[in-house]
Amino acid sequence: MPALHRKKLIGVFDSGFGGISILRGIVKELPAYSYLYLGDTARVPYGNRSSEVVHEFTKQAVDFLFAKNCELVIVACNTASSDALHKIQQDYLPKYYPGKKVLGVLIPAAEEAVARTKNKRIGVIATEGTVRSSSFLRELMKIDRSVKIFQNPCPLLVPIVEAGEQNAKIVPVVLEQYLKPLKKRHIDTLILGCTHYEVFRNKIGKIVGPRVFLVSEEHVVPKKLKHYLMQHPEIEEKLQKKGTVRFFSTDLTEKFTSLGSKFFGRRIKAQKVSLQ
Ligand code: DGL
């Protein structure tokens, strides 16, 4: 059947495994649709790359997912959402893919944080790229100019997750060091501003204590997507409803399959692809 007449898919993209936890949340909330996941595992981490390079990689990922018949792509990566999303939405889509949509993860997290904070002191932990871009600052201030925002980059966390070392003894020490400056600022809400950090949720919760609300994209993004699809029937009705999920990665190792299966909550099988 020509691609034009086939029902469309939802694409989910991350630099590595982290976005699989967002996909798990999305599939749980919206099980009827058909999904493609792409992890750029050959080039992860994105967090310490320049914004130009992250923009280029993100465009390649979007090209790949649209070529695979996606109608809507979720950039389930804060670094890529920070460095590339705006430019892709403003320039790239109108020129090359009019009518298609690319959504990110920053705005849902920012909206949730502002809704939850009582003392208006919000912490953000994220990659160096996300912190450098000030994207969370901008999104939070757009919603409420009176909030105080305290950010800390955590460059060691993504490599720890990608290495499958999230339970290593060193992890609580590293987390304590990254979270200490935020605790001192008396935040009552903390955005886990990198999809990879979801695996540290319990450990982070123990360090910051029960009075700090943890904003987890795995929980907020699926709800926002559901709402978005309700508001956009012209997109929703084009979507295939076969409840399938397929995985692609730019480097295929046993780790992708085993860690990916852990993140997704059931066994996954991925296919290796090239984006260049
Ligand atoms: N998981 C991504 C994020 O949410 C990026 C991690 C990385 O590649 O550095 O920011």
Image: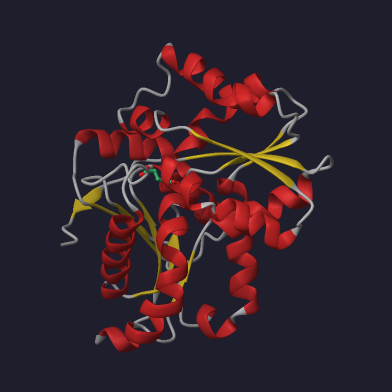
Asked if residue 255 lies left or right of residue 36, the reply is left
Residue 85 seen in the figure: yes
Q: Residue at x 27, y 39 (%)?
A: 256
- Model colouring: secondary structure
Residue 90 placement (x, y as % from top left): 45, 77
**Image: 29 above or below 269:** below
User: Of residues 202 and 151, which is closer to you in this image?
Assistant: 151
User: Of residues 119 and 37, which is closer to you in this image?
Assistant: 119
The residue sitting at the right extreme is 118
Residue 222 seen in the figure: no
* Res. 124 image quadrant: top right
Q: Residue at x 52, y 28 (%)?
A: 200
Q: Residue at x 73, y 33 (%)?
A: 187
The residue sitting at the top extreme is 169
Residue 64 placement (x, y as % from top left): 26, 67
* Res. 62 image quadrant: bottom left
**Image: 101 above or below 75:** below
The quarter of the picture where the C terminus appears is: bottom left
Residue 67 placement (x, y as % from top left): 26, 74
Residue 104 placement (x, y as % from top left): 50, 61
Q: Quadrant of ligand 1?
A: top left
